[in-house]
């Protein structure tokens, strides 16, 4: 292929362009193969199904929603996944524009290696939007494969607004800044296999048309973004009379991995853990009748149909694999918490469940 590409780019016009501007011309095949090799990285079981697999390298992502709805936690949980060796041990850069990053945000995310994170934020003097965006650009251009989180777009303050009096009159310039920044990096992010996550808040729509709330930051970043995820609402996750986390209802407006626009997902965040993969798989399994529910009792039917893969587990617990009644009883639990505990302590059962769900959807 290399020889064919070299011949294709050997005409006089192309050679002159390359001489003047550098290697800005490539064959369609070369670009196709480059983009086809971009890895898709999972976020959570529920969101992955809605997104078509997860979030693709070389893409722009926006997480929009009301304050305290789980945007930062989800972004950091995704960053923790990206740090894993099988996903390229990606460097993580976090732009703390809000200045509200708490220790719980860093210690309450399962698998997040904070020693391998770079956090950019104000020290003595407030940082302007231009400074934050210039730093982000520098990292993206010089750190291949990085995951860069801007938290949040809504908190960036352009330099003019930063130095003016609080009551000064001005025309908001942040949307234009963001639009130009996205344009400058539009072709660089995919070449670097970077992932840019822009967290933004929902604000009142004063136009009088459409929804009552819209994502902050202007339309420019919406045009650039490959994956637009919006939190519709949240609900407390209560267990044993105590709130242990929250359910997040996501709407996927666009996805680069092939998810259908308008897809929805229920994510589950557990305090001190982050995204609770077991809970998400459990909820989907009950909906699909892979785990049967009868009153307070749950039966893992999907395991009864795949005994060979859990035979070692049964034998280790002195269960006769030929005794159908004993096997069924072993995979039967009273209460959701007991099911979750069983699945969490036996990773193979979770793997089988995830495979079953993906095959059905």
Image: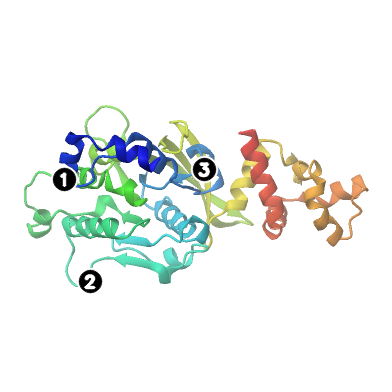
Other-residue count near label 3 (Cα within 10 Å), few / some / many at <14 / 14–19 / ≥20: some
Q: Earlier in the sequence, mark 3 or mark 2?
A: 3
Mark number for residue 48? 3
Give me the C-alpha separation between circle 1 and circle 3: 44 Å
What residue do we see at 23% from left, 71% from top?
123
What residue do we see at 32% from left, 31% from top?
211
Give me the C-alpha separation between circle 2 and circle 1: 45 Å
Examine the rendered structure and indicate whether residue 112 appears above or below residue 30: below
Q: Closer to the camera: disc 2 or disc 1? A: 1
The quadrant of the image that shows the C terminus is top right
Question: Can the viewer see residue 31?
Answer: no
Q: Closer to the camera: disc 1 or disc 3? A: 1
Closer to the camera, 285 or 224? 224
Q: Which residue is mark 1?
A: 19
Q: Position of residue 7 (x, y in %)?
A: 30, 37
Q: Which residue is mark 2?
A: 123
Closer to the camera, 283 or 178? 178
**For numbered disc 1, what is the local secondary structure?**
helix
Give me the C-alpha separation between circle 3 and circle 2: 37 Å
Q: Position of residue 145 (x, y in %)?
A: 38, 55
Q: Position of residue 151 (x, y in %)?
A: 32, 55
């Amino acid at each position: 292929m290399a020889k064919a590409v070299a011949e294709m780019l050997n005409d006089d016009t192309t050679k002159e362009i390359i001489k003047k501007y550098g290697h800005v011309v490539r064959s369609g095949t070369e670009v196709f193969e480059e983009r086809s090799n971009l890895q898709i990285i999972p976020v959570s079981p529920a969101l992955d199904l809605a997104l078509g697999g997860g979030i693709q390298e070389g893409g722009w992502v926006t997480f929009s929603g009301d304050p305290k709805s789980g945007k930062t936690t989800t972004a950091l949980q995704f960053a923790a996944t990206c740090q894993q060796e099988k996903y390229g041990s990606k460097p993580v850069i976090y732009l703390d524009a809000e200045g509200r990053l708490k220790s719980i945000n860093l210690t309450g995310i399962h698998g997040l290696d904070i020693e391998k994170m770079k956090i950019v934020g104000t020290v003595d003097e407030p940082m302007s939007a231009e400074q934050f965006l210039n730093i982000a650009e520098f990292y993206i251009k010089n750190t291949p494969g990085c995951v860069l989180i801007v938290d949040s777009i809504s908190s960036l303050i352009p330099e003019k607004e930063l130095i003016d009096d609080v009551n000064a009159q001005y025309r908001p310039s942040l949307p234009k800044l963001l639009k130009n920044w996205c344009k400058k990096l539009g072709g660089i992010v995919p070449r670097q296999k970077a992932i840019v996550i822009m967290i933004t808040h929902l604000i009142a729509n004063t136009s009088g048309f459409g929804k009552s709330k819209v994502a902050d930051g202007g339309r420019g970043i919406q045009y650039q973004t490959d994956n637009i995820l919006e939190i519709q609402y949240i609900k407390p996750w209560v267990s044993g009379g105590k709130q242990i986390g929250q359910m997040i209802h996501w709407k996927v407006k666009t996805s680069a991995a092939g998810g259908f626009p308008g897809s929805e997902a229920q994510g589950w965040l557990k305090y001190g853990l982050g995204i609770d993969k077991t809970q998400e798989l459990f909820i989907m399994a009950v909906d699909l009748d892979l785990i049967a529910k009868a009153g307070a009792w749950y039966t893992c039917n999907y395991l009864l149909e795949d005994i060979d893969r859990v035979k070692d587990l049964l034998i280790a617990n002195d269960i006769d694999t030929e005794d159908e009644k004993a096997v069924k009883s072993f995979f039967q639990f009273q209460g959701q918490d007991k099911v979750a505990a069983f699945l969490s302590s036996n990773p193979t059962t979770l793997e089988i469940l995830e495979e079953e769900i993906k095959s059905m959807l």
